[in-house]
Amino acid sequence: MQKLADVQPAIALGPLDGRYRPETAPLVDYFSEAALNRARVKVEVEWLIFLLERQVLAGAPAVTEREKAYLRSLPENFGAADIAELAHIEAQTKHDVKAVEYYLKRRLDAAPSAIVDGEPLGENTALTQLHEIVHIFCTSEDINNLAYALVVRGGVEDVWLPAAQAFVDQLSDMARTYAGEPMLSHTHGQHATPTTLGKEVAVFAWRLSRQLKRVKEQEYLGKINGATGTYGAHSVAVPGADWISLSRDFVRSLGLVWNPLTTQIESHDWDAELFGSVAHFNRIAHNLATDFWTYISKGYFHQNLAAQGSTGSSTMPHKVNPIRFENAEANIEISCALFDTLSATLVTSRMQRDLTDSTTQRNIGVAFGHSLLAMSNLRRGVAGLDVNSERLAADLDGAWEVLGEPIQQAMRAAAIAGAQGMGDPYERLKELTRGHAVTAQQMREFIHELNMPADVEERLLQLTPASYTGLAQQLVDFLH
C-alpha cells in the first residue's frame, strides 16, 4: 500500500492546512513556524540596530542608513530559501532561536555583496564586524516573547478582527432589515411574548460587538531583560547603561506594552486575556448558530442553496441541511477548547522557567484558525437565508394565548386606577390559556366580558400576537 506520508507535495495532517486551507490561509503569514521565524529575525535585527543607535556598547561601529536598510530587508524579504536555510541550521543546532542567530550572522558575512539603492555595500561595510552584538544580552525568551506578541497582534488585527467585524456588520444589517418583522418568541421551548426577528438578531450583534471592543483594546506585552528578568549580565557587562529604560524603549519601539516585572518568560497573562475574549466571542457565535439552526427547523428561514454553496442531503431530495451552522458549531467548540487550554497552560511556569509554553504556543494559530473557519461558515450561512414571513405570521396567529400577559397587566393597571371587577387577573388568564389552544374570537370575547374601561378594552381588542412586539423595533436602533 502506498504510504501517504511519502506523497509529494506533502499531504496536510490537519484540516486547517488541508480541506479548509482556502479559508485559513491568511493566518499562515502570522501563525506558521515560518512567520514566527521571520518575526524572530525582525526582533534580532531591531535589537542590533537599537543598541548601535543608542551607542550602548563602547567601541561598537556605527551603521549607515544603507546598512540599516539591508538589515531590515532580511525579515521583509524572508522567503522560501530563508525558510529552508533556517531549517537546515536548526537541524544542526537543535535550537530554534540559536538557528536564527546563526542565520543572521551569515547575513552579516554576506553584506558586502548586498545591493542597496543600486550599489553593493562593499568590503568596508561595518556589518561584518557585528557578530558578537547579534543576540547579545538576550535569552531565547527575550526574542520569542516579542516575536509572538508581534505575530499574534498581526494575526488578530489583520485577519481575525476584520473577519469578526464583517460578521457583526452583516448581523447588524440583518437586524435593521428585519427590525419590524414580528416573530413568536420561545422561552423554555414554549410560546412566549412575541418579538421581532430584527431585535433577536440585534441581541447577538450587540453581544458580539462588546467582545470585539475588548479584543480591539487588548494590550500586547513584551519584555527584554535577560535570563531571569534581572538584567544580571547586562549590568555586569555594561554597568553604566540604564538598562531598565533601554528595555522599556525597545519594547515600545516595536509597538508593544512593556512588562517591567517578569521571570525568564513574559508571563503570558495578556495571552490569556486575549484568548478569553476571543473564546467568549466564539461562544456567543455558537449560541447564534444553534438559534438559527432552530429557526431553520421551524421554517422561519428558507435556505438558499446557491448562496450556501451546498448540495443538501445525499439521499433525501427534500432536505437542505443547515451545514454552515453545524460546521460553525463544531469549529467553535474546537477553537474554544484550544483557547481554554492555552489560557490555562501559558499562565503557569515552574519557578522561573519551564518549556511547556514552547509547544503550547505553536497551537495559537490552530485556535484562531478554527474560529476563523467558523465565522466563514456563519457568514455564508446567514447570507443564504431567506426569511419566511408567511410561516412567521402563521405561528403568531396560532398563539393567541400569548396575549394573556398584556391582558393580565392591563387588568392590574385598571384595578389600581379604580376599575371594578378586575380581581384575580393571573388566575383568570391561567384558566383561559394554560393547556388550551385559544382562538382570536375566544380571546376577544374574554376581553369584552371583563367590562374594562372603554379605552382599555378598545386597545386590547386591537391587539394581535403579531402587533404585540412592544418596543422591539426601536431597540434595534441601539446598534451603531
Image: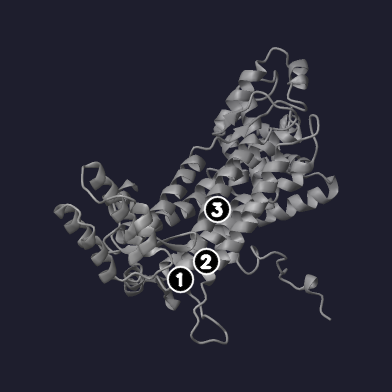
Quadrant showing the N terminus: bottom right
Snapshot colouring? one colour
Q: Residue at x 74, y 44 (%)?
A: 103
Q: Residue at x 55, y 44 (%)?
A: 277
Q: Amino acid at mark 2?
A: Phe
Residue 123: image quadrant is: top right
Q: Amino acid at mark 1?
A: Ile
Residue 325's mark? 2
Q: Earlier in the sequence, mark 1 or mark 3?
A: 3
Q: Earlier in the sequence, mark 3 or mark 2?
A: 3
Residue 67 image offset from top left, x and y in percent: 60, 35
**Mark 1 element type:** helix
Instruction: Kindly report which numbered mark, 1 or 3, lies closer to the viewer in this rendering.
Output: 1
Residue 353 image offset from top left, x and y in percent: 79, 33
Residue 184 visible somewhere in the drawing: no
Residue 51: image quadrant is: top right
On screen, residue 333 above or below 99: below
Instruction: Kindly report which numbered mark, 2 or 1, lies closer to the viewer in this rendering.
Output: 1
Q: Quick check: 189 left or right of 424?
A: right
Q: Quick check: 159 left or right of 223?
A: left
Outermost residue toward the top in this view: 240
Q: Residue at x 58, y 46 (%)?
A: 76
Residue 395 image offset from top left, x and y in percent: 36, 71
**Mark 3 element type:** helix
Residue 433: image quadrant is: bottom left
Reading the image, the residue beneath label 1 is 296
The reply to whether the C-beta atoms of the residues labelled 3 and 2 are less than 8 Å apart is no
Q: CA distance from mark 1 to mark 3?
A: 21 Å
